[in-house]
Amino acid sequence: MIELAGDVDAIRIEFEPSSLTTLKIVLGAILFGIALDTRPADFVAAARRPGTIALGVLAQFLLLPAITFVLTLVLDVRASVALGMLLVACCPPGNVSNVLTHRARGDVALSVSMTGVGNVLAIVLMPLNLAFWGGLHPTGHTVLREIELGAADMLAEVGFVIGLPFAAGLTIARLQPGLARVGARVLGPVSFLALAGVIVVGVADNWGVFLDYIGVVLLAVFLHDAVALGTGFGVAKLTRLPQASTKAMTFEVGIRNSGLGLLLVFSFFDGLGGMALVAAWWGIWDIIAGLTVAQLWSLRWKRGTETKVEPA
């Protein structure tokens, strides 16, 4: 069992109601921005690549949660940490995966298509996934029973945070494509920075608790993030996807919208210690790891390009 500074299952992370409202707005803006950057053609492209899209959906919503479930048992983490890991694994991808795919010189069209499809499916699959895997967990199921989590309640919350802004963004993208393109370029980075700001403020407000307990989740998040990225990469390699598509699959499976997970922790789990710490630290570490992988791929691409240039 991972050594604990105390009982992380017994603590609650404080989060001001105003900050929770801000988090909902920011997440809505992120999903709105994703939809603005999504065209009907992206779904048409997805329909033309049903095998690859289906592979990504299975990897995100079936394989990753299942592997995460096994990882929580192997690490023998506390119940709240296990639920936090499962919650993050059940989250949909965010627009960061599109940015990283572009930076890595990957298949951006596939990435955008998978993000759009993944977020639509997550409205239903995310709450059901968490209820299923959390209910199977030997210690996590007790916490779920104590909280009396209803999948229908979470479905309504996820639908509100994802479904409404996504539908609004798709509508604008359809009716005003020029405005949508400009809006997506501005809203994407602004909402991402805003989410980072909300997480930083939340950590600062609970700095003492963060310092006392961060060691509990450091190894778990590090390994979990590596497993998530490795799952996407491994699935792509096993199915012999092209290199550009492999990069997209890696980030679509490996990059999770942990901000949404954080919102659900405070909305349904009363800021449960391990869950909040996992979601908050994942939001930071996932970006660091993703940028590192993307940069390595980008450098390899540049070196490969340079070797193909004939001397004058």
Image (spheres, rainbow, N blue to C red):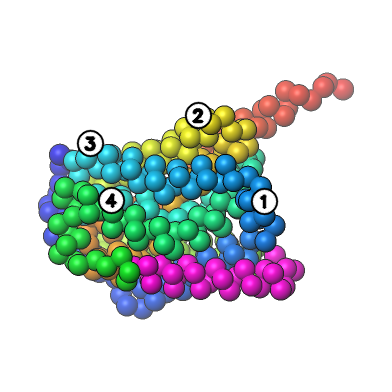
Amino acid on which the number 1 mark rests in the picture = Ala
| Quadrant of the rendered image containing residue 275 | bottom left
Is 19 situated left or right of 120 in this image? Answer: left
Badge 1 is on which residue? 45
Q: Is residue 295 above or below residue 178?
A: above
Q: Any mark on residue 238, and which?
A: 2
Mark 4 vs mark 3: in front: 4
* Horizontal arrangement in the rendering, residue 51 relative to residue 121 (left or right): right
Q: Residue at x 34, y 54 (%)?
A: 129
Q: CA distance from mark 1 to mark 3?
A: 39 Å
- Which residue is the site of mark 4? 133
Mark 2 and mark 3 lie on one chain; the one further toward the N terminus is 3
Image location (x, y in percent) of residue 241:
59, 33
| Looking at the image, residue 162 lies above or below residue 44 | below
Q: Is residue 151 toward the left or the right of residue 104 in the image?
A: left
| Element carrying mark 4 | helix
* Residue positioned most to the bottom: 18
Badge 2 crowding class, 10 Å Cα cut-off, few under 14, some 14 to 19, many 20 or more, is few
The boundaries of the magenta stretch are 154-182
Q: Residues within 10 Å of mark 1 (few under 14, many from 20)?
A: some
Q: Are marks 1 and 3 in contact (CB under 8 Å)?
A: no
Residues at marks 2 and 1, CA–CA distance in whole angstroms: 23 Å
Q: Observer-nearest residue: 294 or 131? A: 131
* Image marks 2 and 3: residues in contact by CB distance under 8 Å: no
Question: Dot 4: within a 10 Å radius of its alpha carbon, few (fewer than 14), some, or many (20 or more) residues?
Answer: some
Where's residue 197, x and y in %? Answer: 44, 64
Dot 1 lies on which element?
A: helix
